[in-house]
Image: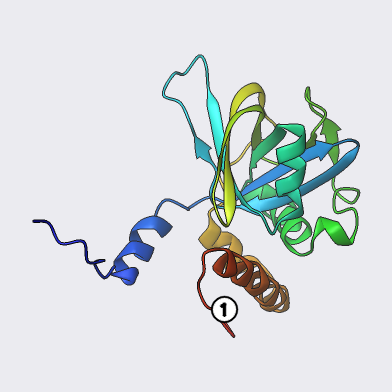
């Protein structure tokens, strides 16, 4: 008879394996009823193997203001950020979208944008983007995974993709410290929803 005891997970090995899938930061923007917002995620990816009918997926924690906007509107755009000549503009996007909550004010008005076909903001300084309409969502304790049909896409600028390692190495140290303090609140919200104890520090 197979044992039903919960096996201990090698968390170091799990972290190493899963972090290898989160190489490129993506900027996600959305709009609901005239309210726009955005965030930075490492969870975006493709959701189809059919090249002529692409789909995109993102996971957004319920702590994030953008979660409810995507849930209500069913639309979002996912942007790749660029390195090289785009690096400074990419770092500005990261600092703007990941540095504060949309609940505290409009984060989008300082960024150059155009309106996408679904009404979401398209970031002019991104490397490339896909825009999607949600066709399905998986509701979990801490987050929701959204899958969307790609309804528009574009290559906005030339250059290579910005990796999370390069971005983190070039972001100002004081900004990273502030981000990590704020991120701890998000982590603890997720831990509470999973029935896990909160952490005092990262």
- Expressed as whole percent of the image width and height from the top left, the position of residue 169 reads 58, 68
| Residue 75 seen | yes
What residue occupies the far top of the structure in this picture?
A: 52
- In this rendered view, identify the residue nearer to me: 107 or 198: 198
Q: Mark 1 falls on what kind of element?
A: loop
Give the answer, above or below, for where 94 lies relative to 168: above
| Residue 123 seen | no
What residue occupies the far bottom of the structure in this picture?
A: 200
- In this rendered view, identify the residue nearer to me: 134 or 80: 134
- In this rendered view, identify the residue nearer to me: 168 or 2: 2
What residue occupies the far left of the structure in this picture?
A: 1
Give the answer, above or below, for where 136 lies relative to 105: above
Q: Quadrant of the C terminus?
A: bottom right
Give the answer, above or below, for where 73 lies relative to 26: above
- The residue located at (72%, 32%) in the rendering is 75
Quickly name the residue at label 1: 198
Q: Please indicate whether residue 76 sits to the left or right of residue 43 in the image.
A: right
Q: Please indicate whether residue 126 sits to the left or right of residue 165 in the image.
A: right
- Expressed as whole percent of the image width and height from the top left, the position of residue 70 reads 72, 39
- Expressed as whole percent of the image width and height from the top left, the position of residue 122 reads 77, 35
């Amino acid at each position: 008879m197979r044992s039903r005891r919960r096996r201990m997970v090698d968390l170091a090995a799990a972290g190493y394996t899963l972090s290898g899938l989160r190489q490129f930061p993506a900027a996600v923007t959305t709009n609901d009823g005239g309210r726009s917002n955005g965030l930075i995620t490492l969870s975006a990816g493709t959701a189809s193997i059919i090249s002529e009918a692409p789909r995109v997926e993102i996971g957004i924690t319920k702590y994030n203001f953008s979660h409810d906007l995507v849930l209500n509107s069913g639309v979002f755009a996912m942007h790749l950020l660029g390195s090289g000549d785009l690096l400074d503009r990419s770092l500005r996007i990261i600092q703007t979208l990941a540095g504060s909550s949309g609940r505290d004010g409009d984060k989008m008005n300082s960024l150059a944008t155009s309106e996408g076909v679904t009404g979401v903001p398209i970031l002019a300084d991104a490397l490339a983007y896909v825009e999607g309409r949600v066709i399905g969502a998986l509701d979990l304790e801490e987050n929701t995974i959204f899958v969307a049909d790609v309804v528009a896409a574009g290559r906005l600028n030339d250059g290579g993709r910005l990796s999370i390692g390069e971005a983190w190495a070039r972001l100002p140290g004081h900004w990273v410290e502030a981000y990590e303090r704020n991120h701890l609140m998000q982590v603890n919200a997720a831990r509470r929803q999973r029935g896990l104890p909160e952490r005092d520090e990262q």
